Structure formats: structure tokens, C-alpha cells
């Protein structure tokens, strides 16, 4: 009899379903069973940064069951997730059972009877489990070292830097983090870049033509000179290019009037068939971005749904930055495509993709379905029920993975250049999908919207029916949303697939950022904290330094770097800078002015911050102790029940919703702003 140890009950149920009738007992550890204590740093910097883990009190019963089961079984098989965190859970289980030492960083496995085994798999299917059980291995010590090195780094920064923030602000619930502060800084720097951006008014002019065909063309040149100019700005994270025309308020009316008296002909034509290829399969970050843009899912929600799908055996492991797809899936997908859509949709050769991630970790596959079933099956019992959101995410994964092995689309693109006697030049373009290929499942709307092209012979005369102007303004660099923040973090090498969602969640829970619609804005708490940390620890919270630390952790995981050396290189300079700043007694005031007066003493109210969020307080404190809740009013929206203001509110778990400002007299509430007119 063999004991298989996994992390969650859902995963255990899937294992039991697959291994039913065989000599295995599957036990769920319910996640980590040991951790660093929450009240002390528990890192001995004088002894190679040795961590002091302790068993979690709430897991004492689980540990007792685990030890009893281990003593009754002939084999102990660790079947936790294949990444560093999964390896760490297996390590702590092995330590509790007496199979591995805790001599950081030189772990040694103690297993004379070869009773302990580790199996690694990237999908929970019969084939994958059989293969893993037939090829067991030892604990991957280098991954354990990398996970613990990250944990130690983050503990050092959090537990030594956070007290500096407490001293500077008087708020002992604030925290600083090695990666979270860099994520916050990205948002803060973008907001500063938006503030200094100067909006400029400009106009685009369009000609509406009639000549058997109705077409709309955009003015591109006047007397041979382009009317559109581009400007590129160097930003904190990358470049931002925006375009505008040279047509201002002083010119537009005269140009439009002059164009109406002109005569036009087609001066040039071009026609080509362009091949469009399917995008790569989902990695963690691509899935989070795709789910956000198509369904509005937060990164935290995506990871929760994906974890469920993985543990139910419906998708492969969802924490990955690899584009690899197994040969078995690729050939099955080709068969599925031929049977479902026709042989013409199957390319001559299987298609592969090169991973572009700067530091792709662990040899995972991309995220894909484990079976070529477009709709996941629903079990009868509650634990196996798939929600609407599970279905939506599964469909994104299924369609994207299958599309990678479909033929490219062929799109005919026709461009027309229109000239005039007065030297105005306009351009228009039309498209026709000649063969839809992968677009059939990834973008059917594009196919249905582009069914014909407008083609006119060179020299054909055109009659201008009307010329119209469109006023526009240059727009500043956009704020980050869930998807774009994850994208820039991945591009810059900040964090890893497993860390994006927790980081974004944390900076919101701490009140450092808030959302304006779908976009992140720094609060009056988050911005000064970011500014202070960036100014006083410029190296620690620099993009390249943070990326370099991730590379160092990857090298530890690959067995090419000593974890203690990495920690020493970091800690020495950090400690010196921290000691210097701790000696500075200046304060960092955190408040936000308002135009509202205190109803008790008439002094101005200000917005202050607590661990529970924003609140209004009297500026005359402590003489006046008036406070009231902070409610952010949504402009242009009124309560459909009583006509009161609509405000943002939060549940106990800090999930925001929209409610009436007249609560409790009015109990209107909605999860989405779309439901409110």
C-alpha cells in the first residue's frame, strides 16, 4: 500500500477517481504545514540566513494524521505541484516525517529504505499519473533552495523595512516588499508621467466619396507633406509613442471648405493577400491578460478558477511561462481539427512557438486542456460542479490551444490612394477574409465583419459627397489595468507566474492603489510611500535590480548559484542603507485635503488612512475627534431605487461593489456599474 500526498481535497478526489481500485491512499495536506512564524523575522543573519520554520497550529491535526498514515504504508509518494512552491510543500512534509534534514542550505535526504518518492506531472490524467508513478524521483533540492531563498529575501525586506515606514508615518500596519513596492512604483511613475503630459488639440479630416461604391478615406498628405506626426516619450518602463496631425483649429475649417471644391481620382492601388498566424498558447500571464480583456476577470480570480480546473484534471498546470505543447496533444489536436472543421484547416506541419520569457522557469508545458473536449463535463455532486466562470476560462484555454494547430488565415487587403488637383491625398483600406483558418474559433466576428473589399481602378474619378472633421486630443500614457500591469512586469522580469496575482491583490488591500473604473491609480497613501522608498533605496526598488534578483533565484533553481552568496550580496548594502534611514527622525505626512467642513467644529475635513481603508477626519484632531466613513461617489450615476448617489463599497473580503449612499434607508446594491443608468 502506498500513501500519496497532495495539497488539496479537490486534487485528492481527482486522484482517487483516476486510481480507483488500486493500492493507493490519497491524503491532502491542505497546503503548507510549516511556515515562518508571523510575529518574528525568524531569519538568523549570522548563520548564513538560516530560517526557523515552525509547524502551523491549525495543521496539528493534519500532521498527526499524516504521521499515522506514513507509519502504516510501505511507500510515501509526494505528489505536490511541479513548481518551487509545490516542491517546498513536499520538503516540509518530508521533514515532518523525518526524511530530510533542515541544515540550510545543505539539505540531505535520509531514506535508507527508499520509502520516500517524489512524482512530477503537469496534468492530472490517467496517462500522466501512470507515467509519473512508473518514474519516481527524489526531491529536487535546488528548487527548495530557490523557494526558500525567495522567502528569506522577502522576509528580510518586509520585516526590516516595514518598521521604517511605521516610524515615518505612525501607521504600524503598512508594509514594504521587494516586489510589491516595485509594482506600486510602476503605477506611481505612470501617474506622474500622465500629470506632466500636455494634451494638444488636433483634427483628422475624412472624405466621404460616392462612385458606385461608398467609401470613407482619411486625409494623409497636403501638397506632398504628411499631416500626421509621431512623438516618442521615454518613460520609466519603456517608451510611449503617440500621433497627432498638424491640423489645428486655425486650419481645419479652411481645409474642409477647400476640399469640397476639389476634384478627386484614384491615384494608386494595392492588393495583397496577407497571412495571419495564430497566437501562441496561454502562459500564466497571457491567460490573465486574455481573461481580463474578454471577461473582465481579475488576476486573482483567474488563478483561482485555473487552480480548480487543474485540480479537476481539466487543464495542465497553470503556473508556467512556457509555450511548449506536448507532441501527443499536438497530433490529437490536428485530428480533432480535421474531424471538426475539415482537413483544409489542418496545416501541413505541426506548429511550435519559441518561449520569449526572459527567464522561463521549470520545464512546464503551456496551459492547455487535458482532453480535446470543448465543454467540460459536470459532475452530479457539488464538489465537481463547474460554474459559468469556470466554463468561460476553460473555453479561452481550449480555443487558444486548438487554434495554435490550425491553418493560418488568409486576408485580402486592398488599399486605395485618392489624389486631387489641389494636392490633397487621402487613403482608405478594406479587407476580405479569403480563408478564416484559426479565426474561425478565435475571432469569428472579424470574419463576419470583413466579407468584401472595395476595389477601384487607378485613374477612376471619385465624387466627394462630403468632407468632415473630427476633433481629437493627444492622450497621455494609459494607466495600468490588471492585464497591462502583468504584461509590463513580465517584460521587465519582475516577479514570476505564481506571484503576479498575489502582488496585485496585496497593493490593493494595503490601500496603496485603487481602481478608477478598470485602471489602477495610486492613492495619497501609496504615492508618498513609493516616492520615499524609491528615493532612499534607489537600488533595491529599481527595475533592473529586481529583475537581476529574479535571475539569481533562477540560477539557484538550476543549481548554478549559491543561495547564501546571493543573500549576502543583497543584505550587506541593504542593512547599511536601512540603518542610515532609521536615524532620520523626519516624518512622512499622509493625508488628503477636502473642501468639506467638519459638522462639529467647522474646520476642514481631511482624508486619512487606516488598516481598514480611507475615512474622513477633522483637521482639528485631537481637539475635535469627528470621523465618518469615506464613500467614493460615482459621477453620472444615480440609484435606480431612490435617486441617491451611487458609491463604491466593500465587502468584508474587500471585494468592491456599488451601493446607494442613502443606506440603510435604501438597500440598492450591484456588483457591476453596467446595471446602473
Image (cartoon, rainbow, N blue to C red):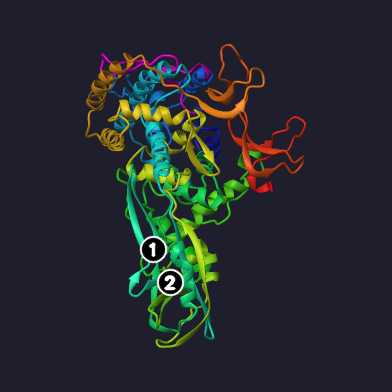
Residues in magenta?
Answer: 31-58
Secondary element under disc 2, as helix, strand or loop, is strand
Residue ID at (42%, 42%): 195
What is the x, y in percent for residue 252?
46, 67
Disc nearer the start of the sequence (1/2): 2
Identify the residue under disc 1.
246
Number of numbered discs on residues: 2
**Looking at this view, is 56 or 312 the one in front?**
56
On screen, residue 321 above or below 444: above
Badge 2: residue crowd in 10 Å (few <14, some 14–19, many ≥20): many
**Where is residue 644 shown, x and y percent of the image?**
72, 38
312 relative position to 327: left or right: right
Q: Is residue 26 above or below residue 452?
A: above
Find numbered disc 1 in the image and state the secondary structure of the residue it sits on. Answer: loop
The reply to whether the magenta stretch includes residue 384 is no
Counting from the top left corner in percent of width and height, residue 102 is at: 32, 19
Give the number of the mark in front: 1 or 2: 1
Q: Residues within 10 Å of mark 1 (few under 14, many from 20)?
A: some
State the image quarter where residue 637 is shown: top right
Which circle marks residue 219 in the picture?
Answer: 2
Amino acid at each position: 500500500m502506498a500513501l500519496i500526498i497532495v495539497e488539496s481535497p479537490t486534487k485528492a478526489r481527482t486522484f482517487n477517481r483516476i486510481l480507483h481500485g488500486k493500492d493507493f491512499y490519497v491524503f491532502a495536506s491542505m497546503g503548507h504545514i510549516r511556515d515562518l512564524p508571523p510575529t518574528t523575522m525568524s531569519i538568523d543573519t549570522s548563520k548564513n540566513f538560516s530560517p526557523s520554520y515552525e509547524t502551523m497550529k491549525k495543521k496539528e491535526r493534519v500532521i498527526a494524521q499524516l504521521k499515522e498514515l506514513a507509519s502504516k504504508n510501505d511507500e510515501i509518494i509526494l505528489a505536490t505541484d511541479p513548481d518551487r512552491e509545490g516542491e517546498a510543500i513536499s520538503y516540509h512534509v518530508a521533514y515532518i516525517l523525518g526524511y530530510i534534514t533542515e541544515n540550510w542550505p545543505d539539505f540531505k535526504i535520509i531514506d535508507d529504505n527508499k520509502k520516500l518518492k517524489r512524482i512530477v506531472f503537469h496534468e492530472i490524467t490517467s496517462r500522466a499519473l501512470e507515467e509519473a508513478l512508473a518514474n519516481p524521483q527524489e526531491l529536487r533540492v535546488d528548487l527548495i533552495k530557490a523557494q526558500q531563498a525567495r522567502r528569506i529575501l522577502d522576509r528580510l525586506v518586509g520585516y526590516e523595512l516595514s518598521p521604517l515606514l511605521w516610524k515615518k508615518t505612525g501607521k504600524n500596519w503598512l508594509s514594504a516588499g521587494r516586489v510589491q513596492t516595485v509594482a506600486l512604483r510602476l503605477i506611481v511613475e505612470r501617474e506622474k508621467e500622465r500629470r506632466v503630459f500636455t494634451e494638444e488639440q488636433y483634427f483628422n479630416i475624412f472624405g466621404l466619396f460616392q462612385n458606385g461604391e461608398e467609401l470613407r478615406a482619411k486625409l494623409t498628405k497636403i501638397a506632398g507633406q504628411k499631416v500626421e506626426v509621431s512623438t516618442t516619450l521615454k518613460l520609466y518602463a519603456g517608451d510611449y509613442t503617440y500621433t497627432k496631425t498638424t491640423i489645428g483649429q486655425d486650419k481645419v475649417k479652411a481645409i474642409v471648405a477647400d476640399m469640397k471644391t476639389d476634384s478627386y481620382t484614384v491615384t494608386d492601388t494595392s492588393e495583397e493577400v496577407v497571412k495571419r498566424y495564430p497566437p501562441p498558447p496561454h502562459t500564466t500571464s497571457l491567460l490573465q491578460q486574455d481573461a481580463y480583456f474578454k471577461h473582465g476577470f481579475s488576476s486573482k480570480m483567474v488563478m483561482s478558477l485555473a487552480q480548480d480546473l487543474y485540480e479537476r484534471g481539466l487543464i495542465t498546470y497553470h503556473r508556467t511561462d512556457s509555450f511548449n505543447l506536448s507532441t501527443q496533444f499536438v497530433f490529437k489536436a490536428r485530428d480533432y481539427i480535421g474531424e471538426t472543421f475539415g482537413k483544409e484547416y489542418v496545416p501541413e506541419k505541426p506548429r511550435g512557438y519559441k518561449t520569449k520569457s526572459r527567464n522561463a522557469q521549470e520545464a512546464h508545458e503551456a496551459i492547455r486542456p487535458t482532453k480535446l473536449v470543448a465543454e467540460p463535463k459536470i459532475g452530479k455532486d457539488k464538489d465537481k460542479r463547474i460554474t459559468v466562470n469556470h466554463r468561460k476560462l476553460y473555453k479561452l484555454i481550449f480555443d487558444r490551444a486548438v487554434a495554435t494547430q490550425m491553418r493560418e488565415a488568409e486576408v485580402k487587403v486592398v488599399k486605395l490612394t485618392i489624389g486631387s488637383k489641389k494636392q490633397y491625398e487621402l487613403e482608405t483600406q478594406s479587407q476580405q477574409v479569403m480563408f478564416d483558418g484559426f479565426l474561425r474559433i478565435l475571432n469569428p466576428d472579424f470574419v463576419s465583419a470583413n466579407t468584401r473589399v472595395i476595389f477601384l481602378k487607378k485613374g477612376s474619378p471619385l465624387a466627394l459627397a462630403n468632407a468632415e472633421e473630427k476633433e481629437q486630443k493627444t492622450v497621455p500614457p494609459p494607466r495600468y489595468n490588471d492585464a497591462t500591469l502583468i504584461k509590463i512586469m513580465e517584460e521587465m522580469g519582475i516577479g514570476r507566474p505564481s506571484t503576479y496575482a498575489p502582488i496585485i491583490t496585496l497593493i490593493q488591500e494595503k490601500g496603496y492603489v485603487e481602481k478608477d473604473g478598470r485602471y489602477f491609480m495610486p492613492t495619497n497613501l501609496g504615492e508618498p510611500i513609493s516616492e520615499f522608498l524609491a528615493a532612499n533605496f534607489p537600488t533595491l526598488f529599481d527595475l533592473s535590480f529586481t529583475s537581476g534578483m529574479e535571475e539569481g533565484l533562477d540560477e539557484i533553481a538550476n543549481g548554478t548559484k549559491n543561495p547564501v552568496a546571493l543573500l549576502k550580496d543583497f543584505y550587506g548594502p541593504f542593512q547599511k542603507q536601512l540603518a542610515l534611514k532609521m536615524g532620520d527622525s523626519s516624518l512622512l505626512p499622509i493625508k488628503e485635503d477636502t473642501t468639506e467642513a467638519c459638522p462639529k467644529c467647522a474646520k476642514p475635513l481631511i482624508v486619512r488612512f487606516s488598516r481598514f481603508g480611507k475615512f474622513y477626519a477633522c483637521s482639528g484632531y485631537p481637539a475635535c475627534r469627528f470621523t465618518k466613513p469615506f464613500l467614493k461617489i460615482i459621477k453620472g450615476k444615480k440609484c435606480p431605487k431612490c435617486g441617491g448617489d451611487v458609491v463604491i463599497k466593500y465587502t468584508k473580503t474587500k471585494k468592491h461593489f456599488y451601493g446607494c449612499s442613502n443606506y440603510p434607508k435604501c438597500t440598492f446594491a450591484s456588483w457591476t456599474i453596467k446595471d446602473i443608468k
